[in-house]
Image (cartoon, helix red, strand yellow):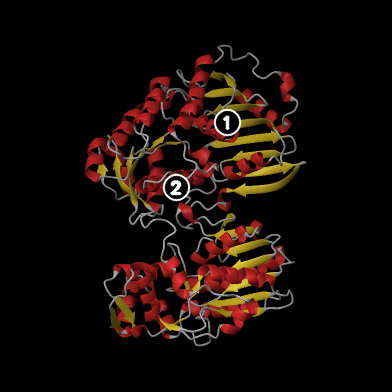
Amino acid sequence: MRILVTGASGFIGRRICALGVERGHDIVGLMRPRGGSPEALPPGEPVFGQLPFDVPRQALENLDAVIHCAGATTGQDWAESTAITVTGTRFLLEGVRRWSPGLQRFVFLSSQSAHEGAVSAYGRTKLEAEALVRSCGMPYAIIRPGLVYGPGRIGLFYRMRRSVLRLPVLPLLGGGRAPVQPIEVDDLAEASFLCLDLPADESVELNLGEPEAMPLRDFLQAIAVASTGRRKKQVVIPLAPVKMVVGLAEALRVPLPVSSDNLRGLEMVRPMDTRPSLERLNLHLKPFDEAMRTAVRDELPPDALPNRPLRVLLIGAGKIGIVHALNLTRREGMALGGIVDTARGAFGLYKSMGFRAPFRTDAAAALEELQPDAAIVATPATTHLALARLCLERGVPALVEKPMAINAEGLQGFRALAGEFPAVPCHIGYMAAQYPHLDEVARLLASGELGAVRGFRAVCLQSHIMAPEPVRWEMVRSRSGGGVIINFAGHVLAVLGRLFGAPVSGRARMWPIHSKEVEDAAEVVLDYGAFRGRMVASWSMPGYARPVYEISVETECARLDIDNYCVVLRRGGRVEGVWTQQDFAVGYNAAPDYTGGGFSCEHRNFARALLARRLGLPLPEDGTPSRRPVTIEEAAAVEQFIFHLYASCEADASSPIWPAPDRTSLVADVDARMEGMLRRLAP
């Protein structure tokens, strides 16, 4: 079945996605942009969106079932709870009625707190959403689980477990008398799928949890015993003063592990009769003591996720540094730990933008004083090798902007550095090679469903060097290493390397337009043996204030058009599929319509490498482009090819570069467009 699971990055949603994939279902997991750590991506096909209204149409089309887990869990805001739980459920029901008229069942995960006497925002809005589901006109199942527990480092149970372990005694709010009917998360996931096997004309409402309710104090003691092997002392805390403290904290926006909504719900919990529902599904719950022992074991070692953000030192306060700084201040698990630049004047702009990290002018002193977990080197390429060595010698992992080096000697220096410090991560900033939508391109090409690749066309265009004066650093070969190819089109060459591997050979013609020392425009041919490709690049093209990268790949039976934002699959002259950055969960994305996803994945991959090193574990192998950092060796292969082009460039720019017979099989409109560009660029 094709099944949409909402709240797919949550504690319950992830387990439902995993079970669905294990059983061979086609799982579409709807998750929010801030869906958690890199390891929080749910199994199946993650789709980027958020209730109440931001749900991509592709997530709602051709569904057989929906398992609706999403809901507001903060419980402190009636407006938020109403928007997500009530309005979001209404929008979801309308969407599946329109785009999946043959839906076999809508499964709604409600709550034990959803009853007429509920006073919390969570319970009341769940109750309202239940009414919407009952009137939807489709077969439905409403599930009211008790307290859901199980392994994992997200969700209410994890917060409870962490509090039990950290506190010397068990604080029992109101004496810990509230009734608890726990259900293990995998049992709940199993129940969700059992609902899909019910008769098509039957709708059900199910109460699920242990048949015999236990007091909350016994549940907390069970956590303590399973975690530490012994019981903890208990302290009874009256609810009234706690309500006052929590209310004040919420008014001051001070985060606490418990909310006013939690407290209101605690007072109004009602025991459920769960036996009829368990029998209806023929669901046998795991023995509680055994399941609790499993639940308190982390899926990862205790320090697999940082107990504090990874502090990253930014070296280089230029334009690209601002992009990194912005991402670091928004990225979960990372923080801007300091900014270094030899020019003090650069700090003024950063301060005016609200960056409050320590500012320093000496990188070595900043590494010594601030003791960062990692560094990002965003300085001119001539300084990259020395700064990378400065970091790695101190055991500080580094992410170095591209190009890595400006000549072959620099490449050898970086390769030597990698051999000297193999245990310290050093990534290179070819962020476009880590675009999330490249995952779909790689999948399509590897599947063979499009046939063999016949060729490609690529363009890299920007309005950057538009006059001889002033002479920018990119126009000076000793500082830049070259022109448009190494400093702009290198991103596209890195993408091509990930999709097709290293070319057998390549040749180019280049010419200046405004610069005197470097090329402002170039035409490159890449030969892969079985096929060839052609790239036109210029940073002196009028009308491209926003840089454009485009690659058109022709296969035996289709065409893939790739740019910064999306990939489009065309077959037989018709569009068959479109995948954008927003269809992939990458956490914070500063520019989802442009290059934001590349930076998001680059930072995510850097963070994963830092955590793996901290744990002494190897970084898991992952062939998908978005989850593979660009290593020194991969960057060296790209830049070595560029230096080869520079060394072997034909002096005669007018000589033919592409024999006519090879052009007939390639896409005519792309060829015509490129010819027009060349005519505009040619001196």
Q: Residues within 10 Å of mark 1 (few under 14, many from 20)?
A: few
Looking at the rendered image, the disc whose residue lies closer to the viewer, 1 or 2, is 1
123 or 471, nearer to the observer: 123
Q: Which residue is mark 2?
A: 604
Residue at x 72% of width, y 46% of height: 575
Q: Secondary structure at mark 1?
A: loop
User: Which residue is painted at 34% across and 39% down in the image?
Assistant: 317
Q: Is residue 358 left or right of residue 59?
A: left
454 vs 486, nearest the viewer:
454
| Left or right for 234, reference 401 | left
Mark yes or no: residue 362 visible: no
Q: Residue at x 48, y 39 (%)?
A: 431
Choose top left, top right, bottom left or bottom right for residue 198.
bottom right
Q: Residue furthest right?
A: 572
Amino acid of disc 2: Arg
Residue 377 x, y percent position in the rendering: 36, 36
Q: Residue 172, image x and y in percent?
A: 33, 80
Tell me which numbered mark, 1 or 2, is placed earlier along the sequence.
Answer: 1
> Circle 2 sits in a helix, a strand or a loop, which is it?
helix
Residue 441: horizontal and vertical position, in percent? 62, 42
Q: Is residue 302 above or below residue 340?
A: below
Is 315 placed above or below 481 here? below
Q: CA distance from mark 1 to mark 2?
A: 24 Å
39 in relation to 206, above or below? above
Task: Tell me residue 79's x, y (percent).
Answer: 48, 73
Task: Check residue 2 in the rendering and tell me which mark sits there, or answer none.
Answer: none
Going by the numbered disc 1, the residue's amino acid type is Gly
- Residue wearing tag 1: 501
Position of the N terminus, as image quadrant, is bottom right
Which residue is drawn at the image coordinates 33% and 85% (left, top)? 175
